[in-house]
């Protein structure tokens, strides 16, 4: 059950636009260096699609996709991505609308702490990534870090968590979990 109804989704988009630009820029730069031309990328729990919009501007060659559990978030993402050929869908991370081994990069930002079944989610992320594909999950540092790492490691082998600092906060409040399929 999603907690992001229409009002909460609009409120989140306003806050994200104000506070998270530097995080989206950092993630877009990471994806830029990790992808070949024309690579297929999906953003899991894309919310209002602000990361996808950065990626579409930075790398118009990428085939971009995004999913979110909340239909209200997807409606806002459609609006925010007007003019960009990004495929969006309402879906649960535990049941992704992609064939096996069909994606080069799976990215997720500030969503994993909300996933109810980490093992099922990690299994599904692994299923859709092509061999050699990149997993890049960013989540709040103090939310379930050990559990996130355990679940991802069970399906990807070595997962390297690194701290990510946002310019407006004195502490590194985001962890990046990086792995290769
Ligand atoms: C805090 S928002 C982050 C949105 C966006 N990634 C960002 O960085 O601005 C978390 C998002 O994860 C989505 N979400 C939560 N559980 C999910 C699930 N099981 N499957 C897909 N999306 C989920 C929520 O609906 C919400 O849009």
Image: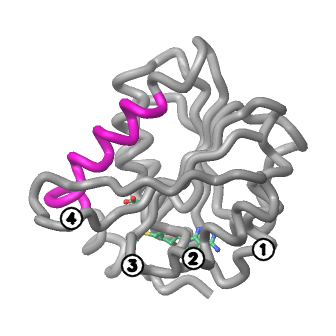
Mark 4: is the Cβ under 8 angstroms from ligand 1?
no
Please name which of the two marks, 4 or 2, marks the residue nearer to the observer.
2
Viewport quadrant of the N terminus: bottom right
Tell which circle, 4 or 1, labels the residue nearer the N-terminal end: 4
Q: Is residue 35 above or below residue 174?
A: above
Tell which circle, 4 or 3, labels the residue nearer the N-terminal end: 4
Q: Which residue is mark 1?
A: 119
Left or right? Give the position of 68 relative to 22.
right
Per the model, the C-alpha gap separating discs 2 and 1 is: 13 Å
* Magenta part of the chain: 16-31
Question: Is residue 18 magenta-colored?
Answer: yes
Per the model, the C-alpha gap separating discs 4 and 2 is: 30 Å
Count the numbered circles shown.
4
Q: Which mark is residue 142?
A: 3
Q: Is residue 97 above or below residue 12?
A: above
Residue in the foreground of this view, choosing between 137 and 80? 137
Q: Which residue is mark 4?
A: 14
Tell which circle, 3 or 1, labels the residue nearer the N-terminal end: 1
Tell whether label 1 touches label 2 (CB within 8 Å).
no
Per the model, the C-alpha gap separating discs 4 and 3 is: 23 Å
Left or right? Give the position of 162 relative to 89.
left
- Label 2 sits on a secondary structure element that is helix
Please name which of the two marks, 4 or 1, marks the residue nearer to the observer.
1
- Please identify the residue farthest to the top as the structure is shown: 37
Q: Position of residue 143 (x, y in %)?
A: 44, 80
Left or right? Give the position of 3 relative to 151.
left
- Label 1 sits on a secondary structure element that is helix
């Amino acid at each position: 059950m999603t907690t992001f109804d229409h009002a909460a989704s609009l409120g989140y988009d306003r806050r994200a636009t104000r506070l998270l630009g530097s995080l989206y820029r950092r993630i877009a730069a990471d994806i830029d260096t990790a992808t070949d031309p024309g690579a297929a990328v999906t953003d899991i729990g894309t919310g209002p699609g602000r990361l996808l919009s950065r990626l579409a501007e930075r790398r118009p060659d990428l085939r971009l996709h995004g999913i979110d559990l909340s239909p209200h978030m997807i409606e806002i993402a459609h609006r925010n991505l007007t003019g960009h050929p990004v495929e969006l869908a309402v879906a649960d991370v535990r049941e992704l609308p992609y064939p096996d081994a069909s994606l080069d990069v799976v990215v997720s930002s500030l969503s994993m702490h909300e996933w109810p079944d980490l093992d099922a989610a990690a299994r599904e992320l692994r299923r859709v990534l092509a061999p050699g594909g990149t997993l890049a999950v960013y989540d709040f540092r103090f939310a379930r870090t050990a559990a996130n790492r355990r679940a991802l490691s069970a399906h990807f082998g070595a997962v390297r968590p690194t701290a990510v600092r946002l310019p407006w906060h004195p502490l590194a409040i985001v962890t990046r979990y990086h792995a290769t399929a």
